[in-house]
Image: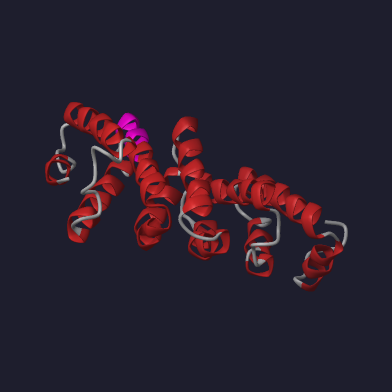
Amino acid sequence: MDYFCDQVQQKDVGRRMQVGQELLEYLSDPARSPDVEQDQQRLDKVIDELTGWVNSSNFKVALLGLDVLGAFVDRLSGRFKSYIGTVLLPLIDRMGDAKDQVREQAQNLILKLMDEAAPPMYIWERLAVGFKHKNYRSREGVCLCLIATLNIYGAQPLILSKLVPHLCTAFGDSNSQVRDAAILAIVEVYRHVGDKVRIDLSKRGIPPGR
């Protein structure tokens, strides 16, 4: 881990690609990597640096950063919870990436966090800021991520009353893709909770015809 802590700080793209692959192999074999959690500060540093990879303008580095963070989630499971605040904002940014592959992988990592690191609503309480993101693709991505969450977990683990107001705001978004995604999300909510959501929408001043 001392080696990786040093190497993940490299800025050279070729070096990052090589180190990322080495780190994936290292994490996949617990027998080879007993020292992953021996030094908390060292682990914090590695996760911080990898979060920087996710923010990279080079999409290959960003994808590899997402892969390696996913491997850390697999390895640490619930112990990754303390890093959720660090990684979520860059993931929201990446859900607004110009490349489909990056957007998809960012969403997959968010869903993996719900599955392995923390309960879905714990994630959503921190993810909801994405509904107000400056990039319309990120706002759209958060709506699509809510649909994916409902498809996997249903409504039970979510406090939808905290999320529906954000969708109502998104109905009036300046971007048509965000408006469409918000409507798809509210349809998904309706599929899970039925008429309660219709009543809720009418209380929020959404016209009955809408």
Residue at 18% of width from left, 57% of height from top? 39
- Which quarter of the figure has residue 86? bottom left
Q: Is residue 96 visible?
A: no
Q: Is residue 206 visible?
A: yes
Q: Is residue 198 above or below residue 57?
A: below
Front position in the image: 171 or 10: 10
Residue occupying the far bottom of the picture: 203
- On the rendered structure, is 133 left or right of 57? right
Q: Main secondary structure of the magenta part?
A: helix
Magenta stretch: residue 61 in it? yes
Q: Is residue 167 above or below residue 99?
A: below
Q: Which residues are magenta?
A: 58-65
Q: Is residue 39 above or below residue 62?
A: below
Residue at 63% of width from left, 57% of height from top? 170
Residue at 75% of width from left, 71% of height from top? 204
- On the rendered structure, is 47 left or right of 134? left
Instruction: Measuring from the top left, give residue 84's x and y in whole percent.
Output: 40, 58
- On the rendered structure, is 41 left or right of 27? left
Instruction: Measuring from the top left, give residue 124's x and y in whole percent.
Output: 54, 61
Q: How is the image coloured?
A: secondary structure
